[in-house]
Image: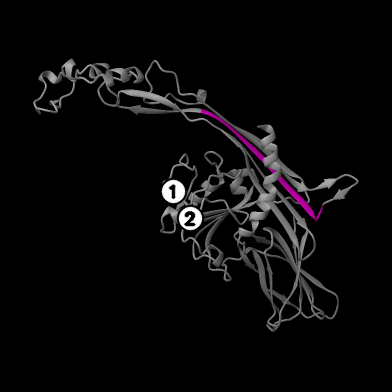
Amino acid sequence: MACQKFLLCVVYPLLFTTLASAQIATTTSLVGTVTDSTGEVIPNAKVTATEIATQTVYNTSTNANGDYSIEFIRIGSYRITVEHPGFETVTKTGINVEINQVVRTDFTLPVSTVNQSVTVQASAPVLNTDDATVAQVIPTRQVADLPLNGRDPMQLAITTPSVINGLKGTNGVPPGEDFIGAGTREIQNSMSLDGISIMNNLITTTPNRPIVDSISEVEVQTGTYSAQYGAYLGVHIDMITKSGTNDLHGSLYEYVQNQIFNARGYFLPATQPKNPLKQNQFGFELDGPILIPKLYNGKDKTFFMGSYEGLRLISQTPQVFTILTPQMFQGNFSAVSTPIKDPVTHVPYPGNLIPATQISPVPLKLQKYYPTPNLPGLTQNYAVSTANNNNTDETIDRIDQNLGDKTRIRNTILLPISRD
């Protein structure tokens, strides 16, 4: 079994890379217009955008209309510098870009006769005028801090107005979860991780539950979608994994639930102990630059993110059923108020007692396989707890490589190692 898991870990990245061609493109970009102090556009101005955490640099120039556009950039905080001969160099910092967000930052360059520069601390735009998408973004801090049952980041979607959990069970065949929103049925939702669909397209559910500590942002779209989301009209949940930066970050955690912290179940008989519940959810997340002493320095170029989470759940779910009493197996239905009739003559049996000669031997043989009621009454007379165990191991890993100003590679791996 261990060998099979190892081979799966080796083969899966190759398979995942092959499937990446079917990904949903993200439209995260920086746009703007560069003008002089009189409002005239400035063509051929050099625009340099630098992502602060990784020092990733994007270069472009304004067109004949003074507009610039830098597309398919990583999420994060940016510093944008615009320069042109004869004008002061202007830099704006603190420009935050979230998943699938088109951020507009316009520049006005004062005329200069000497070498001068101006730095401006930018603020987040109040209104997005370049994209009509209706969406809510849950940033890194909220993803990490908000309480989530089962540590499922997709449950953050229900914090968005008009979005609720779907009606399909998470333990169905195949298992998965889905959502309802935007005035449509649950068959119109979609879910993706780093632009890759993680959804079963046939039944629009996902069996995957990404690790919370590996997620940077969650975007929930509920209407007016871009073209790449045209296949579905309902809720779109887009999750972006963390990418490494020039600094090393990480977390180590374990969450514990146990029956010793819980009250007794309402329907449990007085003689029955509390239902067992032992849940341990543990793991780690680590990201940063790839550094190999004396061999390779990946700062500003090569970054990694690795995460693992294990779940060990032993629990029982209390249920109450209605079953036959031992007397009923013998034909004694005297406790039932409804008359029991002979199926041939349609005449009620006296006292609701069926003669032994009319009782089939089949139920008498099956009686030994039936439990005995443990609650009083004829209905809801049997309480039992059914096992609800779940053991899983999962890993999410990511590699980012900057090959130059125009070429960047990203590879994300979501791998359930085992599931019992």
**Residue placed under numbered mark 2 in the picture:** 189
Q: Secondary structure at mark 2?
A: loop
The colouring scheme, among rainbow, by chain, secondary structure or one colour, is one colour
Q: Residue at image x 49%, y 28%?
A: 315
**Residue placed under numbered mark 1 in the picture:** 166
Q: Residue at image x 48%, y 26%?
A: 262
Q: Residue at image x 72%, y 77%?
A: 62
Side (left or right) of 266 relative to 215: left
The count of marks equals: 2
Crowding at label 2, few (<14), some or many (≥20) Cα neighbours within 10 Å?
Answer: many
Residue type indicated by callout 2: Asn
Task: Considering the whole magenta stretch, tell me its main secondary structure.
Answer: strand
Q: Are marks 2 and 1 in contact (CB under 8 Å)?
A: yes
Please tell me whether residue 393 belongs to the stretch shown in magenta: no
Query: Quick one: 48 or 316, which is closer to the camera?
Result: 316
Where does residue 298 sit, x and y in percent of width and height? 82, 51
Query: Quick one: 82 or 13, which is closer to the camera?
Result: 13
The quarter holding residue 346 reads: top left
Where does residue 86 sit, x and y in percent of width and height? 81, 81
Residue type indicated by callout 1: Gly
Instruction: Please say whether residue 105 is visible from this viewpoint.
Output: no
Crowding at label 1, few (<14), some or many (≥20) Cα neighbours within 10 Å?
Answer: some
* Depicted 286 relative to depicted 135: above or below: above
Q: Earlier in the sequence, mark 2 or mark 1?
A: 1
Q: Give the residues in magenta.
A: 299-314
Instruction: Please say whether residue 238 is visible from this viewpoint.
Output: yes
Q: Secondary structure at mark 1?
A: loop
